[in-house]
Image (cartoon, grey):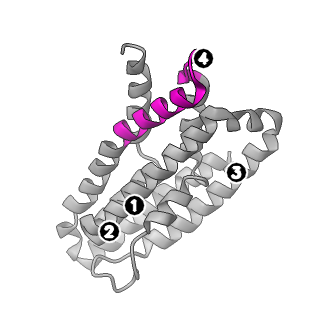
Amino acid sequence: MTDLLPLASYCLVMSATPGPNNFMLAITGANFGGRGALPVILGIQAGLFVQTMLMCVGLGSLFVAYPLAQQVLRVTGSLYLIYLAWRLSGASVDGVHASKAVTFIQATVFQALNPKSWLKAITVASVFMPAEGNAFTNALQVSLIGVLVGAPCNFMWALFGMSIRRLLKDPRMQRAFNLAMGAALLVLALMFLR
C-alpha cells in the first residue's frame, strides 16, 4: 500500500493544479452549472483512463522511437487549447452567447490533445508502473488510481465555477471572468509550445 502513496500524491498534484481540464471545468461550472459540468468531468476521466492504460501497456515506447510524434501531439494540443480559449472566453451564463457546454465525447477526445494529460500519462507509465506482475493488471491499477484521485479534484474545479456563478450574473463580471480564464488557457498553450 505504501507503494501507492507516491502515485496517488503525483495524481493529486497533476489533477488539482491549474491546467486545461480544470480551467475548462471552472468555466463550464460557472456558465452551465452542475448539469453542464458532469459530462465534462466524466469525459475527462474516461479519456485519462484510456490514455494512461495505453501508455502503460506500451504506447510510450512509440514516443521513444518516434520523438516527432510527441512533438506533433504537443503542437496540435497547443493549437486546440488556443481554439478552446477563444471558444470558452465567449461563453455566457444565460446561454445567449454559448450554445452548449462541452460534451462527454468532446472532453474525452480532448485528452488526446491535452499536453498536460500526456505528461501525466507518460510519467505514470514510466515512473509508477510496477515492473513485476501482470502488465495489464498493473496498468489497470495505476489507471484506476488516477481516476479515483482525479475525479474529486475535477469536481472541486467545477464547484468553484458553480460557486461564483451568482457573481457572474452581471454581464461585465461574467465577461471579465471568461476572458481571464480564456487568457489563462492561452498562456498554457503558449507554454506548451515552447
Q: Amino acid at mark 1?
A: Val
The circle drawn on residue 40 is 1
First along the sequence among labels 1 and 4: 1
Mark 1 element type? helix
Q: Foreground mark, 1 or 3? A: 1
Distance of mark 1 from mark 4, alpha carbons? 33 Å
| Quarter of the figure with the N terminus | top left
Q: Are marks 1 and 3 in contact (CB under 8 Å)?
A: no
The circle drawn on residue 73 is 3
Against 73, residue 94 (above or below) is below
Q: Where does residue 158 sit, x and y in percent of width and height?
A: 30, 56
Instruction: Label the magenta part by its dominant secondary structure.
Output: helix
Q: Where does residue 137 sit, x and y in percent of width and height?
A: 52, 29
Q: Where does residue 108 sit, x and y in percent of width and height?
A: 50, 58
Mark 2 element type? helix
Give the residue pinned by disc 4. 131
Is 117 inside the magenta-drawn segment? no
Q: Quadrant of residue 189?
A: bottom right
First along the sequence among labels 4 and 3: 3
Q: Quadrant of residue 163?
A: bottom left
First along the sequence among labels 1 and 3: 1
Q: Are marks 2 and 1 in contact (CB under 8 Å)?
A: yes
Instruction: Please tell me which residue is depicted at 49% across the width and 65% down the height of the picture.
Output: 105
Q: Magenta segment, which residues?
A: 127-150
Left/right of residue 95 with respect to residue 75 in the rendered view: left
Mark 3 element type? helix
Q: Amino acid at mark 2?
A: Gly
Q: Amino acid at mark 3?
A: Leu
Q: Foreground mark, 1 or 4? A: 4
Q: Where does residue 115 sit, x and y in percent of width and height?
A: 59, 47
Give the residue pinned by disc 2. 36
